[in-house]
Amino acid sequence: MNALRVLILTAAALLGSSALAATYTVKPGDTLYNIAQKANLDPAQLLQLNNLSSSTLQVGQKLNLGGNSSSSVNVGNIPATPVSRNSGNGNTIRAAASRYLNIRYMLGGTGAGGIDCSGFTRVVLQQLGVSLPRTARAQYGVGNTVSRGNLQSGDLVFFNTLGRGVSHVGVYLGNGQFANANSYNGRTVIEAMTTSYWATRYIGARRVL
């Protein structure tokens, strides 16, 4: 009888410990952002849980999803393709961009004391677990190309403002709006891409989430 009780207690302990150690195996097409969203975590939390220094993931890599309510998520059904960010997730991206609004524009700046366009997109996307290169031209080379008609919140949008290729970048927020560090306004702002100035200078977009 005692042996049976020990067996039951051991089994219960094992079940309890497995519930506290939810994991997910990275599949082709996964991103840190869409895994975090499905597991009810912030991308920054997922980075911290796994001691990751960047958002780069490897197929087959096992991620710790922590021991909170996210452990009840059916992680085996997380889709391999990025989740849509047109509705609820758009609010997350707008909130990330809003933390850096009204900061004065400063060429070469990367923080609260002053920031330029690529510095702005870099710190905004960093909150979502994405590491970007420093310059607008370099950022244009990451992620996947996306057409203007298929833009989603979080996409990087690029412009030719100097007449010699990519020279400006912002973060698309949805509904034709994007956030950017604007040298003309002298600060970080939210603007409409449909204005004649931006519409005629638009080059393309890249999806990094």
Image: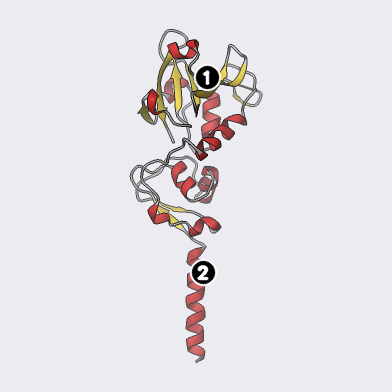
Q: Is residue 146 left or right of residue 189?
A: left
Q: Residue at x 47, y 82 (%)?
A: 7
- In the rendering, which numbered label is found on residue 192? 1
Q: Residue at x 44, y 25 (%)?
A: 139
| Residue 24 figure quarter | bottom left
Q: Which of the marked residues, 2 or 1, is nearer the chain's N terminus? A: 2
Q: Nearer the viewer, residue 1 or 75?
A: 75
**Vertical side of 52 occupied by 100: above or below:** above
In the rendered image, residue 187, in percent from the top left (x then y), is placed at 62, 18
Mark 1 crowdedness (10 Å alpha carbons): few <14, some 14-19, many ≥20: some
Q: Residue furthest top?
A: 163
Distance from disc 2 to disc 1, alpha carbons, whole Å, reads 51 Å
Q: Residue at x 48, y 14 (%)?
A: 198
SS type, badge 2: helix
Q: Are marks 2 and 1 in contact (CB under 8 Å)?
A: no
In the rendered image, residue 70, in percent from the top left (x then y), is placed at 51, 55
Mark 2 crowdedness (10 Å alpha carbons): few <14, some 14-19, many ≥20: few
| Residue 158 figure quarter | top left
In the rendered image, residue 163, in percent from the top left (x then y), is placed at 43, 7
SS type, badge 1: strand
Q: Residue at x 43, y 20 (%)?
A: 137
Residue, disc 2:
16
**Vertical side of 200 occupied by 35: above or below:** below
Which amino acid type is shown beneath numbered disc 2? Gly
Q: Nearer the viewer, residue 127 or 69?
A: 69
